[in-house]
Amino acid sequence: GKGIAVFTSGGDSQGMNAAVRAVVRTGIYLGCKVYFIREGYQGMVDGGDNIIEADWSSVSSIIHMGGTVIGSARCMDFKERWGRLKAAENLVKRGITNIVAIGGDGTLTGADTFRAEYSGLLDELLSTGRITSDEREKNKFLNVCGLVGSIDNDFCGTDMTIGTASALRRIIEALDAISSTAYSHQRTFIMEVMGRHCGYLALLSAMASEADYVFIPEDPPNPNWPEKMCKKLKQEREMGKRLNIIILAEGAVDVEGQPITAEQVKKVVVDNLQQDTRITILGHVQRGGNSVAFDRVLGSRMGAEAVMALMEAEEGATPCLISLEGNQAVRLPLMECVKQTKGVAEAMKVKDWAKAIELRGRSFMR
Ligand code: ADP
């Protein structure tokens, strides 16, 4: 059978374990030899015990767990050619000719680079005697398939990234908890949620919690936002609402591209309305805890589809990304999605907000 390796890299997210489990089991079911690579690219570079063959039971009882049981890490070595050379050697020695990369745009870019230079890496390994010509021949091609694990839903080309639904669930739980105390004391709560470049979590949690105001990076507020926001908060109170909720994405900015901070928003509320105002920064709670059913199912579907895509691909085919499109698992060209995702960040950098929202495409709500 073919050799397949699966690894998780970059930020962790709930549902990654479900994806790893599905890759392992689908691979074994189809007669492949499946390997885990621990600690992302670092494990691929270091080899040894970091790359181990998986069996059916090694992924038992992990589907519900948050995070990633095989570990994730940032890896500087893999950004260097010598690091990728070592990684290639470790794959060849084990007969691994397929990889499933689970991570964000950095991880997927790295996987694409690796595949593109793979035959050059193998030539170098052969010429320096690190692999034999037989090994070179048997491992000529590397096939790559990417899955997006991210709580931010910040990736273009897919409706939902693995982990978003669980993070939203956590945010809503926290908002519900805060609402009951805010309600008792007629407070205003400012909740900062994750999303350095993406307002998806902020926007959806605002909708689901009847928030009064929301700040997201892709759509900075009009410069007179303090006035507008205060008017809205005041109106709500006058109509008898006992609490106000303001949601702020971590990466919220104004039209000049300057950050809007929770402290800044609080000062506006306190100075103008004298409301008792509290800030909650949710932080890593959003990544923690068990995954919701949606992410378990999403990870499972994406993982299984990744293996099938690899088995059906021509040797050395361009890398594909498994995306969710209208509730179907589909295969898209990986680098086009990565480029579009990077395009959003670039558009925001030059303050072209309309372009940023347009590029978000499927991953953003319309
Ligand atoms: P994410 O995958 O969540 O975007 P990072 O950007 O930190 O997270 O990328 C994760 C890892 O992927 C990095 O630590 C590095 O090992 C690898 N990586 C990222 N960008 C590249 C690149 N351009 N070339 C090679 N490897 C990369």
Image (spheres, rainbow, N blue to C red):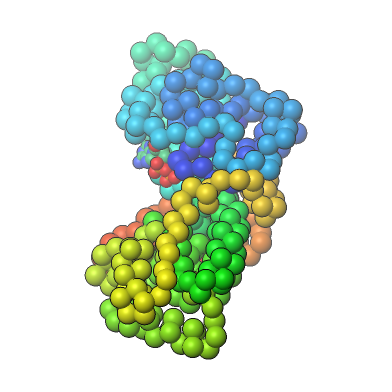
180, 112: nearer the viewer: 180
In the drawing, does residue 73 fall left or right of residue 251? right
Image point (67%, 48%), residue name: 296
**Placement of 319 over or under 350, stated as above or below:** above
Question: Which residue extends farthest top?
Answer: 129
Q: In which quarter of the image is ligand 1?
A: top left
5, 315: nearer the viewer: 5
Residue 179 is drawn in which quadrant? bottom right
**Placement of 136 over or under 191, stated as above or below:** above
Image point (40%, 75%), residue name: 275
Image point (57%, 51%), residue name: 163
In the image, residue 272 lies at what x, y percent?
32, 79
196, 51: nearer the viewer: 196
Residue 294 is drawn in which quadrant? bottom right
Q: Quadrant of the N terminus?
A: top right
In the image, residue 136 lies at what x, y percent?
48, 20
